[in-house]
Image: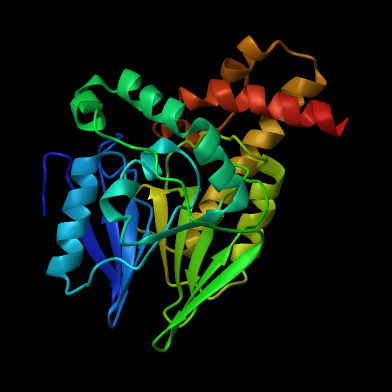
């Protein structure tokens, strides 16, 4: 299962697998997905950025003893996590938070085109992509029960996006965090950074042994805490500049991010600063 995109399947608990990719740098930078096997039921979490990557994950599911996929959960609407939907559905029933379903319906095609434009090396693979809209949409929470295992879908409010889903398996203490965790990677903020911090604080109270991030390698609760500390520091530093009415173009060189200056994808800070200025403005 090792491809030129450095696919890595990792069983993090019995029957619970992470699918780590390196299509977006750095090595292990994602986007990631995974799956849960229980008897004749296979639940997939996110469907990856290319059809080839999705087909490889389907092959990995079969190699791990999984059956035809029953459900596919989209943790949010970004194209790098939903492009492979058509490989699994049908037969899988696609589930997402209602804001994610609406975003996929309205923006899915444009998002796929954006990926093809940004990454010409993927364009050939993306020619056959069809937008597959989730069939089931939930609002705040939903639980799938099968065997002796429950799979809890939790919408914690706007954070990375407006429709994020956390997938938590309490019996195994495993969390699929989606893009609420960029593990030691600068994230793009598109939802609500203040609530994102609150969600990460709430997650500290859950029993979690392993976290499968949207981007980066499999981590632990400590990596969720590190993500929170990054967001808190970024918000604090940008707020100082906002309060001084500093032009946004000057903020990147002004803020002191300490060790987080070593995290990859520093270019995302420009977008994050603009989003934070908007957040601070709407709160005043």
State which quadrant residue 71 falls in. Answer: bottom left
In the image shown, does 113 or 3 lie closer to the viewer? Answer: 113
- Colour convention: rainbow
Residue under the point 75% across and 31% down = 279
- Give the x, y percent position of residue 109: 42, 29
Quadrant containing the C terminus is top right
| Quadrant location, the N terminus | bottom left
Q: How many marks?
A: 0
Tell which residue pokes out farthest to the bottom in this image: 148
- Residue 140 vs 113, above or below: the answer is below
Q: Residue at x 36, y 47 (%)?
A: 216
Closest to the observer: 23 or 40? Answer: 40
Task: Judge left or right: residue 5 versus residue 237.
Answer: left
Residue for point 79% across, 14% down: 245
Rendering quarter of residue 114: top left
Residue at x 23%, y 28% (from the top left corner): 122
Report the front residue among 54 and 199: 54
Q: Position of residue 218 (x, y in %)?
A: 35, 58
Residue 154: horizontal and vertical position, in percent?
59, 63
- On the image, the x and y values in percent for residue 124 come to 19, 26
Q: Is any part of residue 80 visible from this angle?
A: yes
Left or right of 21 in this view: 73: right
């Amino acid at each position: 299962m090792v491809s030129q995109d450095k696919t890595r399947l990792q069983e993090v608990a019995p029957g619970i697998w992470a699918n780590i990719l390196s299509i977006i740098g750095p090595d292990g930078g994602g986007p990631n997905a995974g799956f849960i096997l229980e008897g004749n039921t296979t639940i997939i979490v996110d469907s990856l950025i290319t059809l080839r990557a999705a087909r490889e994950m389907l092959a990995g599911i079969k190699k791990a003893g999984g059956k035809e996929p029953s459900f596919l959960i989209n943790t949010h609407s970004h194209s790098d996590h939903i492009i492979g939907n058509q490989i699994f559905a049908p037969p899988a029933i696609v589930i997402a938070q209602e804001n994610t379903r609406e975003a996929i319906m309205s923006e899915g095609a444009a998002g796929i085109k954006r990926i093809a434009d940004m990454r010409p090396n993927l364009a050939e693979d993306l020619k056959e992509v069809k937008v597959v809209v989730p069939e089931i949409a939930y609002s705040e929470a939903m639980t799938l029960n099968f065997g002796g295992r429950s799979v809890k879908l939790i919408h914690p409010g706007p954070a990375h996006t407006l429709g994020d889903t956390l997938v938590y398996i309490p019996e195994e203490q495993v969390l699929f965090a989606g893009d609420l965790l960029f593990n030691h990677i600068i994230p793009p903020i598109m939802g609500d950074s203040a609530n994102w911090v609150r969600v990460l604080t709430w997650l500290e109270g859950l029993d979690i042994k392993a976290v499968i991030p949207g981007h980066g390698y499999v981590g632990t609760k400590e990596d969720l805490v590190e993500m929170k500390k990054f967001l808190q520091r970024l918000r604090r530093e940008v707020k100082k500049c906002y309060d001084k009415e500093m032009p946004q173009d000057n903020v990147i060189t002004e803020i002191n991010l300490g060790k987080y200056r070593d995290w990859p994808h520093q270019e995302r800070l420009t977008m994050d600063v603009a989003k934070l200025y908007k957040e601070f403005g709407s709160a005043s």
